[in-house]
Structures are given as C-alpha cells and as structure tokens.
Image (cartoon, rainbow, N blue to C red):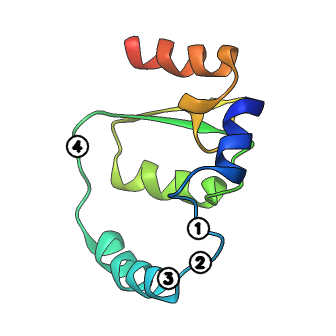
Amino acid sequence: HDQTFLDFLATRDPLQSRRLSVAWVTAWKRWLPTFLGTNTCTHPLLVIQGDADTTVDWRKNLPVIRAKFPHATLHLLSGGYHQLVNESDPLRESAFALLDA
C-alpha cells in the first residue's frame, strides 16, 4: 500500500530478481523435509502475517507453524502484504504495535 516503496521495488531495488532461480527452488525442496522432520519448539514466537500476502502460501504455512511452534501467537493483519514493515502507515503501525506489546 506504500506506492513509493512499490516503485522502489519495481525499478530501483538491486535485490529484486525478475526470475526464480532453479538453485533456490532446489535448496528449498531439500530444506523442507528437514524442517518438517524437526521436533516442535516450545519457545514463544510471534508471527505477524498479512492476509493479502501473495508471496508465501500463508494459509498452508500457518497450520505448519502452529504444529511446529505450539506456543506461537499468530496475528493476521487485514490487507497486509508480504513486507509489513514497508506497508502503509496504518498497517506498519499495527505490526509495530504487536512487536512492542
């Protein structure tokens, strides 16, 4: 929702790739079974997820996070995309308020 940030991502961010690397996908495919095979973690964890995120499959990920981190506190931010700290002021403030709490 922050147009200045979106323009930066689209035109000037040197870290934004226009392609998805086969090496990245291969590494992810190797890592996933390791992650799924690990024990649960009982440390408290805060997860803040935007419900408009199209970068990750958060609907599929959240149940896995709940299973692996049973003491996690999960917050969905309505309208939030993937990079919540680079969102519009109200969404960014909501994410920071959750972190501060």
Q: Residues within 10 Å of mark 1 (few under 14, many from 20)?
A: few
**The label number, if any, that marks residue 42 in the structure image:** 4
Distance between the Cα atoms at labels 1 and 4?
Answer: 35 Å
Kindly check if marks 1 and 2 are in contact, taking CB atoms under 8 A apart as contact.
yes
Vertical comparison of 97 with 24: above or below: above
Vertical comparison of 98 with 52: above or below: above
Can you give x and y, in whole percent of width and height, for residue 97 in the image? 49, 12
Going from the N terminus, do you reach mark 1 or mark 3 first?
1
Going from the N terminus, do you reach mark 1 or mark 4 first?
1
Amino acid on which the number 3 mark rests in the picture: Val
Amino acid on which the number 2 mark rests in the picture: Leu
Residue under pointer 2: 20
Distance between the Cα atoms at labels 1 and 2?
Answer: 7 Å
Kindly check if marks 1 and 3 are in contact, taking CB atoms under 8 A apart as contact.
no
Decide if residue 81 is on the left or right side of residue 28.
Answer: right
Q: In the image shown, does 48 or 6 lie closer to the viewer? A: 6
Residue under pointer 3: 25
Can you give x and y, in whole percent of width and height, for residue 33 in the image? 36, 80
- Image quadrant in which you'd find residue 76: top right
Residue under pointer 1: 17
Can you give x and y, in whole percent of width and height, for residue 21 in the image? 53, 82
Amino acid on which the number 1 mark rests in the picture: Ser
